[in-house]
Amino acid sequence: MSSEKKSVSLVLPLNVYQKIRLLAQQSNRSTAGYIRQVLICHLRCLDAGVSYPPGLL
């Protein structure tokens, strides 16, 4: 079963994009796939009540 999807666009500083691209390559994912996975993981953490250290976000 396929869920509905929505395409989004974002602008990143070059240094952030380069770091994300490198991490994506290291995990054998596309850059978009890596960003998608990070966001899903972040949302799961929020749902689980995981909080962040002060100043992190």
Image: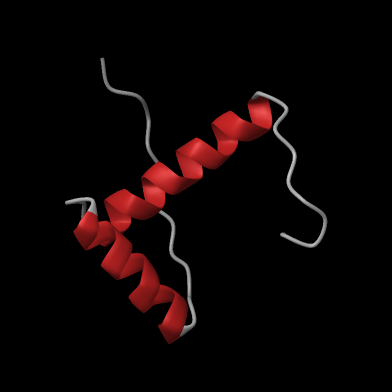
Q: Residue at x 38, y 43 (%)?
A: 37
Is 56 left or right of 39, judged from the image as shown? right
Exactly how many numbered labels are in the figure?
0
Q: 3 above or below 55?
A: above
Q: From this viewpoint, which residue is outermost toward the bottom?
A: 14
Can you give x and y, in whole percent of width and height, for residue 46 in the image? 67, 33
The colour scheme is secondary structure
Q: Residue at x 44, y 56 (%)?
A: 8
Can you give x and y, in whole percent of width and height, for residue 15 in the image? 43, 83
Q: From this viewpoint, which residue is outermost toward the left?
A: 28
Is 21 left or right of 38, judged from the image as shown? left
Q: 2 above or below 39?
A: above
User: Which quadrant would residue 47 be assigned to in this image?
Assistant: top right
Q: From this viewpoint, which residue is outermost toward the front?
A: 53
Can you give x and y, in whole percent of width and height, for residue 16 in the image? 45, 76
User: Which quadrant would residue 5 be assigned to in this image?
Assistant: top left
Q: Residue at x 20, y 61 (%)?
A: 25
Is 55 left or right of 45, judged from the image as shown? right
Image quarter of the C terminus: bottom right
Residue 52 vs residue 16, the one in the foreground = 52
Q: Residue at x 39, y 47 (%)?
A: 36
Image quarter of the N terminus: top left
Q: From this viewpoint, which residue is outermost toward the right?
A: 54
